[in-house]
Image: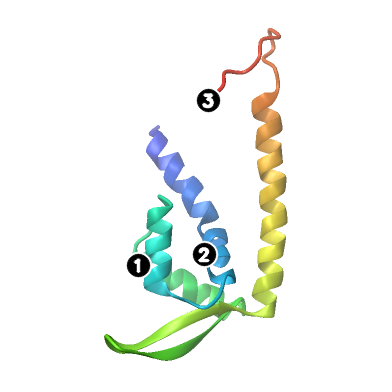
């Protein structure tokens, strides 16, 4: 078993959450999302992002508007719908619960009474 496979799966599991967080700040173009995700070491390619954006749009969580671009064709800018804002709120609560659970598990003393290693 390779650790890289598990790392990829962990990142995929939180990708939707990260995308919604980015869009929650205001309308955003897909290329800007890719750039921010890459800067945050969330390795994502267009072939992953665009189908996910379509799925989120079809679920009623996102909306988009076309805007003219000075450097090419019109661009699609995404925003959260009210349902998307509510969905993101629930994901934030879940993230806090999961983070707390992991912190509790990692900080629990070992069976022999020693403290866990600081990693």
Image quadrant containing the N terminus:
top left
Locate residue 83: give its quadrant.
bottom right
Q: Is residue 81 above or below residue 107?
A: below
Distance between mark 1 and mark 2 Cα atoms: 15 Å
* Mark positioned earlier in the residue sequence (2 or 3): 2
Residue bearing mark 1:
47
Q: Position of residue 23 (x, y in %)?
A: 54, 71
* Left or right, 117 with reference to 49: right
Q: Position of residue 67 (x, y in %)?
A: 42, 90
Residue bearing mark 2:
19
Q: Is residue 113 above or below residue 24?
A: above
Locate residue 30: give its quadrant.
bottom left
Viewer-side label of 1, 2:
2
- At a point 38% along the width and 39% down the height, the residue shown is 4
Task: Determine crowd level at label 3: few under 14, some 14-19, many 20+ residues with C-alpha closer than 10 A.
Answer: few
Q: Secondary structure at mark 1?
A: helix
């Amino acid at each position: 078993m390779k650790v890289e496979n598990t790392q990829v799966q962990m990142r995929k599991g939180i990708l939707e959450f990260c995308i919604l967080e980015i869009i929650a700040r205001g309308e955003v173009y897909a290329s800007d999302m890719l750039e921010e995700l890459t800067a945050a070491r969330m390795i994502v390619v267009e072939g992953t992002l665009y189908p996910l954006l379509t799925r989120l749009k079809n679920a009623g969580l996102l909306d988009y508007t076309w805007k003219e671009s000075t450097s090419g064709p019109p661009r699609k800018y995404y925003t959260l719908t009210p349902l998307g804002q509510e969905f993101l709120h629930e994901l934030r609560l879940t993230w806090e619960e999961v983070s707390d659970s992991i912190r509790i598990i990692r900080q629990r003393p070992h069976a022999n009474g020693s403290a866990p290693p600081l990693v």
